[in-house]
């Protein structure tokens, strides 16, 4: 049995940027404090929502180290250290280990992709080169590559492969992963609109975009379920479904950075090639947030 790195809702945290595109660490700290003060159970830094793909390696390493130091053990910090290059992923992962992160989040190799055998080789190499618990990250809509349940099972045999962030959207696949791996591979939802459904399939919580603007509410959706109040968990899930989906009217993290700015933080721009939403989508995000009382 592998104890989960966290239960509840981890925020897939944005990386606040200044207008010149550099990381705004002052605002990053203020936003981390907001998250921790409002129920976030863990912080995932430099993931997809944190624009890891546009950070230079030196910036990536610096952001992880800074975040770990700033959080200072208040909640677990999970470092996004995946890459389409195994060697690069090992390099960044080793830096995260040296920075005393609590765990690594490793997306599947993208663009060049690989076979299922290649996935096993990729993750095994990173596992053997590092000393932290690892969360696999399956998001085929972005990477073009799916971790098959049988592959997840083989990887679950490695002692520090702790779990999987499942964003395939395929509930039948997630069911099979749970059946094959049981307590040897923890499952977290990677889709905010499937939190309840994945908890029903044995999930331990969510790594969430929605948590950026609703940390307490996202935590509560999971915690109600874990406490045995499934009805209230489902009721909250249904209530926040529209808002969760509004965060994906454009490519993540474009909408959520706009939303974070609307609640009073200087999220700043995304880095190219990501650009601002058009006015129609901006208006939709704003109106949806007004419906939820997040902005006036």
Image: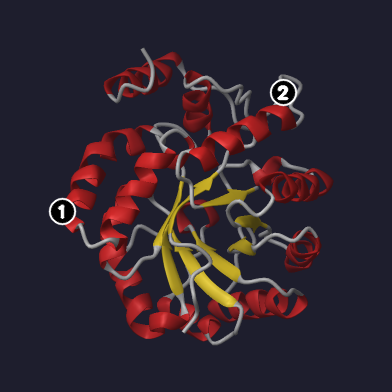
Residue 231 - label? 1
Name the image quarter holding residue 123: bottom right
Disc 1 crowd, CA 10 A, few/some/many (<14, 14-19, 20+) = few
Q: Which residue is mark 2?
A: 18
Q: Measuring from the top left, give residue 32's x and y in whole percent.
A: 60, 38
Identify the element where label 2 is drawn: loop
Residue for point 19% across, 49% down: 232
Q: Nearer the viewer, mark 2 or mark 1?
A: 1
In-image side of 220 versus 114 (left or right) = left
Residue for point 46% across, 26% down: 259
Q: Measuring from the top left, give residue 106's x and y in whole percent.
A: 61, 63
Instruction: Tell me which label, 2 or 1, sits earlier in the chain.
Output: 2
The relative height of residue 185 versus residue 84 in the rendered view (above or below) is below
Quadrant containing the C terminus in the rendered view: top left
Q: Is residue 272 visible?
A: no
Find the distance from the CA under tag 2 to the CA under tag 1: 42 Å
Residue for point 53% across, 66% down: 5
Q: Measuring from the top left, give residue 152's x and y in whole percent.
A: 48, 78
Q: Measuring from the top left, give residue 120's x and y in whole percent.
A: 60, 80
The foreground one among 183 and 232 is 232
Identify the element where label 1 is drawn: helix
């Amino acid at each position: 049995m592998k104890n989960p790195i966290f239960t509840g809702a981890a925020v897939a945290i944005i990386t606040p940027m200044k207008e010149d595109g550099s990381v705004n660490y002052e605002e990053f700290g203020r936003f981390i404090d907001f998250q921790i003060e409002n129920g976030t159970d863990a912080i995932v830094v430099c993931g997809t929502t944190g624009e890891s793909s546009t950070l230079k390696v030196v910036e990536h390493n610096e952001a992880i180290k800074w975040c770990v130091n700033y959080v200072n053990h208040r909640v677990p910090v999970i470092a996004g250290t995946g890459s389409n290059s195994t060697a690069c992923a090992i390099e960044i992962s080793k830096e995260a280990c040296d920075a005393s992160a609590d765990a690594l989040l490793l997306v599947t190799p993208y663009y060049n992709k690989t076979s299922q055998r290649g996935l096993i080789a990729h993750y095994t190499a990173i596992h053997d080169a590092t000393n932290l618990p690892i969360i696999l990250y399956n998001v085929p809509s972005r990477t073009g590559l799916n971790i098959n349940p049988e592959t997840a099972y083989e990887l679950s045999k490695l002692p520090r492969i702790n779990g999987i962030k499942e964003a395939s959207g395929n509930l039948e696949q997630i069911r099979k992963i749970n059946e094959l791996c049981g307590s040897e591979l923890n499952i977290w939802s990677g889709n905010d609109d499937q939190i309840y459904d994945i908890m029903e399939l044995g999930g331990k919580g969510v790594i969430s975009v929605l948590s950026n603007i609703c940390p307490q509410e996202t935590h509560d959706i999971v915690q109600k379920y874990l406490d045995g109040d499934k009805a209230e968990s489902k009721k909250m899930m249904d209530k926040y479904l529209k808002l969760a989906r509004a965060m994906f009217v454009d490519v993540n993290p474009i909408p959520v950075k706009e939303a974070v700015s609307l609640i009073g933080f200087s999220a700043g721009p995304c880095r190219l090639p990501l650009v601002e939403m058009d006015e129609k989508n901006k208006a939709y995000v704003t109106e949806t947030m007004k419906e939820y009382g997040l902005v006036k």
